[in-house]
Image (cartoon, rainbow, N blue to C red):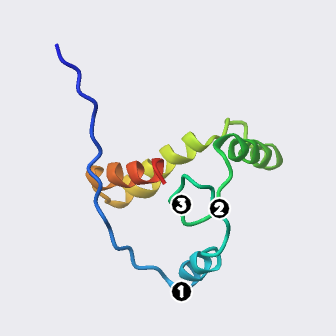
């Protein structure tokens, strides 16, 4: 049986922004970026972000382990699917987030 890698179907999307998010993106246009990134904003590594999330959980008394993966799942289920966004749209957004 042949194995074929799943190919991503990259689509361009235009997303209208409110003034405050647009201002934040504009603020960081001149921020130095690592060479191999297309990210609009500076972002910590997953390890550093998970460390921040652990600290937030400790301060807040949350006993569940918080990670970037937990945040991704929560975004997909509670924010998107429970608010009527289609599974296909959620899947495409998560693909975009994974590669930004």
Residue of label 1: 19
Location of residue 10 in the rendering, given as x and y in whole percent from the top left corner: 29, 54
| Of the pair 13 and 84, the residue shown nearer to us | 13
Tell me if residue 17 comes above or below residue 51 in the rendering: below
- Among numbered discs 3 and 1, the one appearing first in the sequence: 1
For the residues marked 3 and 1, what is the alpha-carbon distance in whole angstroms?
19 Å
- Among numbered discs 2 and 1, the one appearing first in the sequence: 1
- Mark 3, other Cα within 10 Å: few <14 / some 14–19 / many ≥20: few
Please name the residue shown 28% across and 30% down the image: 5
What secondary structure is found at the residue carrying circle 2?
loop
Please name the residue shown 55% across and 66% down the image: 40
Seen as rendered, the residue at the extreme left is: 1
For the residues marked 2 and 1, what is the alpha-carbon distance in whole angstroms?
19 Å
7 left or right of 65 in image: left
Can you tell which mark lies on residue 28? none
What secondary structure is found at the residue carrying circle 3?
loop
Q: Are marks 2 and 3 in contact (CB under 8 Å)?
A: yes
Please name the residue shown 63% across and 56% down the image: 34
What secondary structure is found at the residue carrying circle 1?
helix
Tell me the quarter of the picture where residue 16 sits: bottom left
Please name the residue shown 54% across and 52% down the image: 36
Residue of label 3: 39
| Disc nearest the viewer among 2 and 1 | 2
Location of residue 47 in the rendering, given as x and y in whole percent from the top left corner: 69, 40
Seen as rendered, the residue at the extreme bottom is: 19
| Of the pair 26 and 66, the residue shown nearer to us | 26
| Of the pair 54 and 94, the residue shown nearer to us | 94
């Amino acid at each position: 049986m042949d194995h074929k890698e799943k190919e991503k179907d990259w689509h361009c999307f235009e997303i209208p922004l409110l003034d405050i998010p647009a201002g934040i993106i504009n603020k960081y246009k001149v921020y130095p970026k690592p060479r191999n990134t297309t990210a609009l904003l500076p972002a910590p590594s997953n390890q550093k972000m998970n460390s921040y999330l652990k600290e937030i959980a400790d301060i807040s008394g949350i006993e569940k382990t918080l990670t970037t993966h937990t945040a991704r799942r929560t975004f997909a289920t509670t924010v998107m699917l429970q608010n009527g966004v289609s599974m296909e749209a959620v899947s495409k957004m998560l693909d975009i987030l994974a590669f930004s």
